[in-house]
């Protein structure tokens, strides 16, 4: 086995998993590769396949200095199979097999459970690329265009990461699943992507920033839980994916932050104090703060659905099996088996929303969702500091977890953003107020005009504070004509 600190770029598929010495696997990946490239050209970023984009490519897997920046055409991006370094003597950190040596091969009894986890994870990655494929045409700057494409190529690599595991460890059915991953399509009637939020549209750049803030953060949480896995190749794969995920959330967080900042600046310059003076704010060509709140309401609620049911035997089984742990399992100080522990779960009981203690083992989805909400709240607080610094008295908030849900306890009810239950008639009114309306979306769409001059930014978004890779403000991140 290579030690994995250096990536082999000589072959078709960059890797640090010794692909040269594993002919069967190399063959399988090379057979899959053309289908992937076809998929990328068909479903990847529309209209920019020939442009030169200033992208980072991983050249190592250590925590420092793994990225090399250069201009590449996206179809020629070096998608690779990269695992974080193996930890000597690693043991299974939780569940029934806690303390046994981590698995280097698939434990037979958990084969299908593991395959399902890999397929669900893998399915989200190309789905997000599909959702974002038309955004290039309306990018507010070359900087943002480049960031979109960076996220896209890395989500493509995340698909590779799961396909590697499927093909290396699951033989024929792994290869079949790998093919299926290229066939499903986000939003398709006949063969949609597996999870709800990945079939929604990402029609404009505010949606994109919200998606990368809220939904890529679900990616972070799920990957962090899988990074704890007793199946060591999955753990190592996810640990490297997490280093890329950080940039996706940066794009979302700073994207929305820049929108907020621009809106505040424009309001101040025009002498508008009231954030609800929507018509006047919109007339300035910026996105009013209440509409930003509505977009956040939508993306937060859609993302909560990705955590599954609050009470889940699937999640309990995956934990017991040592396949999927808790967020930061390695920093928790309990038995790591949850034999007797309880966990408070917010439930809908007899028409009332209230906390109910249930067996912690069955509440793992809820627990991960709670960790997600806490992580998200910290990000919202950073947005609010931008509002505060800009002298605005508007504050963004997260809606209640029962708001606008389709999966879990609250799929059965209608709840307001504060969690109070609503009748269907009340919901019909409130949902129109608390979620983006057709009119709101039309307004945002009207702002989505491409800005492709070097160093220029569309009027609805502030420039970033620093460039990518410390490049100067007028750097040509994407050479469109080439
Ligand atoms: N939509 O026992 P339950 C990312 C199904 S994002 C449709 O609660 P479980 C990314 C469920 O499959 C991270 N169906 O489910 C972000 C089950 O069906 P079966 C993606 C749903 O398994 C941005 C049934 O309902 N990774 O990486 O505990 C850009 C019973 O439910 C949904 C993962 O999710 C839904 N939302 O929990 C790019 C990690 N929810 O089996 C990328 C892997 C539930 O009874 N996945 N169902 O037919 C998992 O760990 C879990 O499967 C889930 C669901 C958390 C998704
Ligand atoms: Fe991803
Ligand atoms: Fe991501």
Image: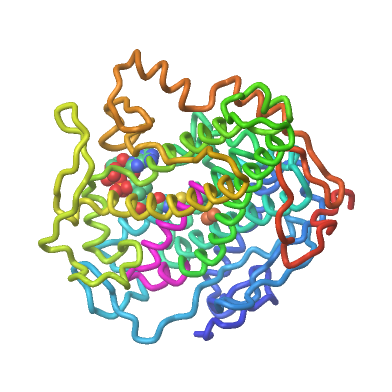
Query: Which scheme is used to colour this image of the protein?
Result: rainbow
Task: Give the magenta-colored segment's residue range.
Answer: 213-237
In-front residue for pair 257/319? 257
Question: Does 113 appear above or below 261?
Answer: below
In-front residue for pair 438/473? 473
Q: Specify the quadrant of the image occupied by residue 172.
A: bottom left
One can see residue 179 in this view? no
Residue sitting at the far right:
482
Q: Is residue 32 magenta?
A: no
In-front residue for pair 439/363? 439
Q: Position of residue 400 (x, y in %)?
A: 35, 37
Question: Does 304 appear above or below 147?
Answer: above
Is most of the magenta stretch helix, strand or loop?
Answer: helix
**Residue at x 35%, y 16% (from the top left corner):** 426
Q: Position of residue 445 (x, y in %)?
A: 68, 28
Residue sitting at the far left:
340
**Residue at x 37%, y 76% (from the top left corner):** 104
Quadrant of picture, ligand 3: bottom right
Q: Position of residue 334 (x, y in %)?
A: 20, 70
Q: Is residue 222 magenta?
A: yes
Question: Does 125 appear above or below 162?
Answer: above
Q: Position of residue 69 (x, y in %)?
A: 74, 68
**Residue at x 56%, y 83% (from the top left corner):** 5
**Residue at x 38%, y 73% (from the top left corner):** 232
């Amino acid at each position: 086995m290579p030690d994995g600190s250096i990536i082999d770029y000589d072959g078709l598929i960059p890797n640090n998993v010794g692909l040269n010495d594993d002919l069967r696997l190399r063959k399988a990946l090379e057979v899959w590769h053309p289908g992937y490239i076809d998929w990328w050209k068909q479903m990847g970023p529309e209209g920019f396949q020939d442009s030169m984009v200033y992208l980072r490519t991983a050249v190592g897997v250590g925590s420092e200095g793994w990225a090399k920046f250069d201009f590449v055409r996206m179809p020629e991006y070096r998608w690779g199979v990269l695992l974080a370094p193996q930890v000597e003597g690693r043991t299974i950190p939780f569940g029934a097999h806690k303390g046994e040596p981590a698995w280097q091969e698939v434990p037979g009894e958990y084969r299908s459970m593991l395959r399902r986890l890999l397929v669900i994870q893998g399915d989200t990655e190309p789905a997000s690329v599909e959702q974002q494929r038309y955004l290039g045409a309306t990018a507010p700057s070359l900087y943002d265009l480049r960031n979109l494409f960076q996220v896209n190529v890395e989500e493509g690599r995340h698909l590779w990461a799961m396909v590697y595991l499927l093909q290396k460890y699951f033989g024929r059915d792994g290869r079949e699943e790998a093919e299926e991953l290229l066939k499903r399509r986000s939003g398709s009637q006949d063969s949609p992507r597996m999870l709800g939020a990945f079939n929604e549209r990402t029609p404009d750049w505010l949606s994109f920033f919200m998606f990368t803030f809220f939904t890529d953060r679900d990616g972070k949480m799920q990957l962090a839980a899988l990074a704890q896995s007793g199946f060591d190749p999955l753990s190592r794969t996810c640990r490297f994916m997490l280093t890329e995920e950080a940039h996706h959330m940066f794009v979302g967080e700073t994207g929305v932050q820049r929108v907020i900042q621009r809106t505040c600046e424009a309001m101040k310059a025009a002498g508008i104090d009231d954030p609800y003076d929507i018509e006047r704010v919109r007339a300035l060509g910026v996105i009013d703060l209440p509409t930003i709140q509505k977009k956040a309401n939508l993306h937060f609620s859609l993302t909560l659905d990705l955590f599954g049911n609050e009470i889940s035997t699937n999640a309990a089984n995956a934990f017991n099996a040592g396949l999927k742990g808790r967020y930061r399992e390695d920093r928790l100080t309990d038995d790591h088996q949850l034999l007797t522990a309880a966990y408070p779960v917010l439930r809908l009981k007899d028409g009332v929303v209230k906390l109910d203690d249930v067996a912690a083992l069955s509440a793992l989805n809820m627990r991960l969702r709670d960790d997600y909400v806490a992580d998200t709240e910290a990000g919202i607080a950073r947005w609010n500091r931008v509002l505060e610094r800009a002298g605005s008295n508007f504050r963004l908030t997260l809606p209640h977890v029962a708001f606008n849900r389709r999966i879990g306890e609250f799929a059965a009810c209608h709840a307001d953003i504060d969690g109070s239950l609503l009748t269907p008639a009340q919901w019909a009114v409130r949902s129109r107020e608390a979620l983006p309306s057709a009119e709101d979306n039309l307004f945002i769409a009207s702002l989505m005009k491409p800005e492709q001059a070097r160093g220029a930014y569309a009027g609805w978004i502030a420039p970033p504070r620093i460039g990518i890779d410390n490049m100067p403000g007028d750097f040509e991140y994407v050479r469109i004509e080439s």
